[in-house]
Image: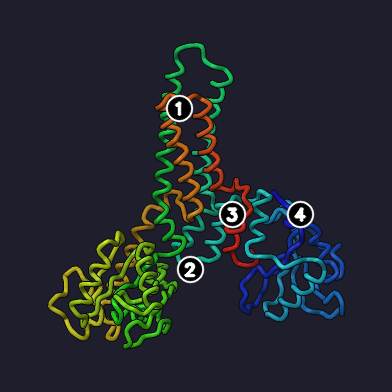
Amino acid sequence: MLRPADEYPIAALASGSGPGAVGVIRLSGVGALEVVKPALGGVSTIKERQTSLRTFRDPKSGEVIDDLVAVFFKGPNSFTGQDTVELYCHGGSYIIQRILGALYECGARPAVAGEFTKRALLNGKLDLTAAEGIKDLVEAQSRQQWLSGRQLYSGKLKHGIDGLRREAIEVMAYLEAMIDFPDEGDTSHVALNDVRRRLQKVAASIESLVSTFESGQVASRGLMVALVGAPNAGKSTLLNTLLGKQRAIVSAIAGTTRDYIEEPCLIDGRLVRLVDTAGIRETEDVIEKEGVALSKKLLEEADVVLALIASDSSDSERKAFKEALQYIQKTVIHVLTKSDLSSPPWLDSNMLSISCKVDSGLKELKKRLSDIVDHHLQGLEEQPFLTSLRQRQALIKAQTSLKRFFEQDSQGAGHEVLAFELQEAARAMSSVIGDISNEDILDKVFSEFCIGK
């Protein structure tokens, strides 16, 4: 639902923030054309959806700022559903700031993160999953992110959810009809058996969608890989090597890394999020102890754990590290580091032996990580999948309501109770695609967007 603040004209740079040949400035809201009119010297000659070469002047001094192209989109036939003006100017930062400053002086205000897309959602131009898809497409550094954004923006997830929601609503309508017009015959149990079969299919489809969340996160955010090991196991060295730059401090002094470092990295075209953690060991240092605790927490969140043990590690270090890993329920790749120093007798055949110093074993390590990403993405192109925790939580609510439906049904509950549970399930599914009245949820979703989208 639009509020007065959502009608106010807003302006922002819609193209990249760095210098470029062309900058795109977007202005949207009630009276957008009137806002830009003083700077363009009148807009009577600008026709809707036609490019127009214009001179942009400072509204106060009359100084020419730039010669640019202007396009006017009359609402609701625009991205936001509102009157929108787009200005294609030269991409220098000075020119862009002067133009934006002039628009603000003429009555627009700076757009906040995701505000244009949020207005498009509120005006019914797209659903919430499509909005999330736009974010993924804008941020895409790899094919997997493009795949995530494309399936959301194209409506694949929306159509899947819509079909399940309609099925629940049709069943709910049948139950409500039985409440209003009770069947006097003895065949209602037959109809209820059909209801149960239909809802069991809905529940199974929701379960299948929920099961895609982990792989969907890998597509949307990248494979989270935690580098763990004892101090001086070579975690920071491996991080820097995979990144191709000096990101973490490397020192012979144990316990140098106190907090974790997270960096995105493309490995053979796949997006991976490398997390360098504090060395796991017993310590009396308060700050280092916090880092060790955080490292153990990150082990639970990671998709893959690279368990690093140095070739020159002591028996006690290996024993302590083995104990720390025994409860991890994630994919663990055991890696022997500093293999150029020695090949210890305790080396396991399942361990991957690497040396960053002489560039040994790194190709195999990269291949293993790439294969894990490919395994997650396998089959995602053929089906809708979840990409955000928000989507997963909504479907889990729908699952809970359907579970209560079957429990209440088995206990002989009335049609009113059963219809209520279906209403709750349908409402939860609707929230996936945008039927959300909680403004805080929408603000959280769009706060992760960039300015200008």
Q: Secondary structure at mark 2?
A: loop
Closer to the chain start, of discs 4 and 2, is 4
Q: Secondary structure at mark 1?
A: helix
Spatial distance from mark 1 to mark 4, Cα to Cα? 44 Å
Amino acid type of the residue that numbered disc 4 sits on in the rendered structure: Pro
Place of residue 92 in the rendered image (x, y in percent of width and height, measured from the top left)? 68, 80
Residue tagged by mark 3? 441
Extreme-bottom residue of the structure: 252
- Residue 109 seen in the figure: yes
Q: Secondary structure at mark 3?
A: helix
Classify mark 1: residues with Cα within 10 Å, few (<14), some (14-19) or many (20+).
some
Task: Judge whether 112 appears above or below 208 on screen.
Answer: below
| Residue displayed at 87% across by 80% down | 61
Spatial distance from mark 1 to mark 3, Cα to Cα? 33 Å
Classify mark 2: residues with Cα within 10 Å, few (<14), some (14-19) or many (20+).
some
Residue tagged by mark 4? 4
Mark 3 near mark 4, Cβ–Cβ under 8 Å?
no
Classify mark 4: residues with Cα within 10 Å, few (<14), some (14-19) or many (20+).
few
The residue nearer to you, when weighing 37 against 407, is 407
The label nearer to you, 3 versus 2, is 3
Side of 235 relative to 47 (left or right) = left
| Residue displayed at 29% across by 67% down | 368
